[in-house]
Image (cartoon, grey):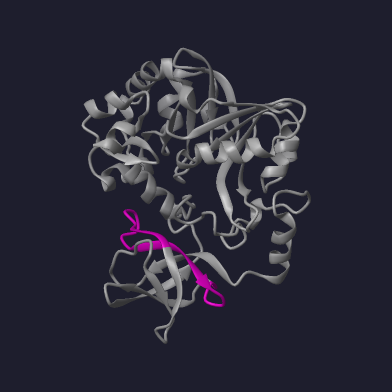
Amino acid sequence: MTEEKTLKKVALNDVHEALGAKMVPFAGYNMPVRYSSDIEEHKTVRNGVGVFDVSHMGEFMLKGPKALDLIQRVSSNDASKLTDGKAQYSCLPNEDGGIVDDLIIYKIKDEEYMLVVNASNIEKDWNWIANKNTEGVEMTNVSDEISLFAVQGPKASEAMQSLTDVNLSDMGFYTFTVGKFAGVDNVIISATGYTGSGGFELYIPNKDAKEVWTKIFEAGKDYEIKPIGLGARDTLRLEMGYCLYGNDIDDTTSPLEAGLGWVTKFTKEFTNSTNLAKQKEEGVKRRLVGVELIDRGVPRGGYNVLNAEGEVVGKLTSGTMSPMLGKGVALGYINRPLTKPGSEVFIEVRNRKLKAVVSKPPFYKG
């Protein structure tokens, strides 16, 4: 009861409850996990168009002549490469070789950026960045003022085009624009995605959220648009092999172990960059890899990974039965040399050893 009282609510909490969503505590928020079934919602996004309310995510605005310098010092990717209207995936390394959080950096214009962080880490990230802000960058936490809808699926652009003059089908991956959407001015429309099926995200003031949500569903009626919960969001991202903070990456996992070397740029100095550069040179002992089950079963985070001799060589961090592939897929940290795609491993499931193979995500190719 106490937990329920302390749970935060997104602006459209009552709308989701009225739609019959099963609500669960997630990252400190009361969130819709499903409206019908995870499999049905998953397939709606893969084949048509669905809408996630992910307003629990955090948004920080950073402004001023030293904004880029601060971002460069706290993040692993090279934000100096960003131009107006471009976004970039990155992470915040900690001092101990792990990850504070993963995030998306949006360059609104010179000296103005938006950082989008995970809901469970809003306070943690804010404090981390604020403590590094030694040069007076203007920081504003707008997380409680913004609703975020992710309209995802191959029919998303076509279904939503009537609501904006922005050419949605022309938007490149990891680009964004600020424009009018569903009659609301200054909406950030982005194409960063977390499902692998295309679509875009809408950052809207809370006061306009209900009106925009209603218009989205009116516009998408002929496309059989449906609201989608966090359950399908998890299976969709897993089919693509996308990391989830708290499962696949955390304060103890190195970006290099997590396969995030591509967003770890040693062309600049950032938190713990010297030690991470050394780790890159020496090579990591374990690595986050994809695993596909050959035997029938459902892999879950926490299950041990064994070699042919039955020795524990790793642990799964996330796993599911893929709705599109009809087999178990997972992510997990495995010791070298079994990280090579094609390596045979076994997953320990309730005293059974299920045969599996190391695979390079995405598992689902579309």
Which residue is at the far front? 2
| Residue 260 falls left or right of residue 216 | right
Examine the structure image and report whether residue 323 is included in the region drawn in magenta. Answer: yes
Relative image position of residue 58 (x, y in whole percent) = 50, 33
Identify the residue at horizontal 72%, vertical 31% (top origin): 67
Identify the residue at horizontal 34%, vertical 57% (top origin): 322
Q: Quadrant of residue 22?
A: top left
Front in this rendered view, residue 29 or 237: 29
Examine the structure image and report whether residue 353 is included in the region drawn in magenta. Answer: no
Relative image position of residue 232 (x, y in whole percent) = 34, 45
Identify the residue at horizontal 56%, vertical 75% (top origin): 336
| Residue 75 falls left or right of residue 243 | right
Relative image position of residue 217 (x, y in whole percent) = 33, 24
Quadrant where the image shows the N terminus:
top left
Q: Is residue 95 above or below residue 6?
A: below
Q: Is residue 212 above or below residue 299?
A: above
Relative image position of residue 116 (x, y in whole percent) = 55, 35
Q: Is residue 227 visible?
A: yes
Identify the residue at horizontal 62%, vertical 47% (top origin): 92
The residue segment tinted magenta is 317-340
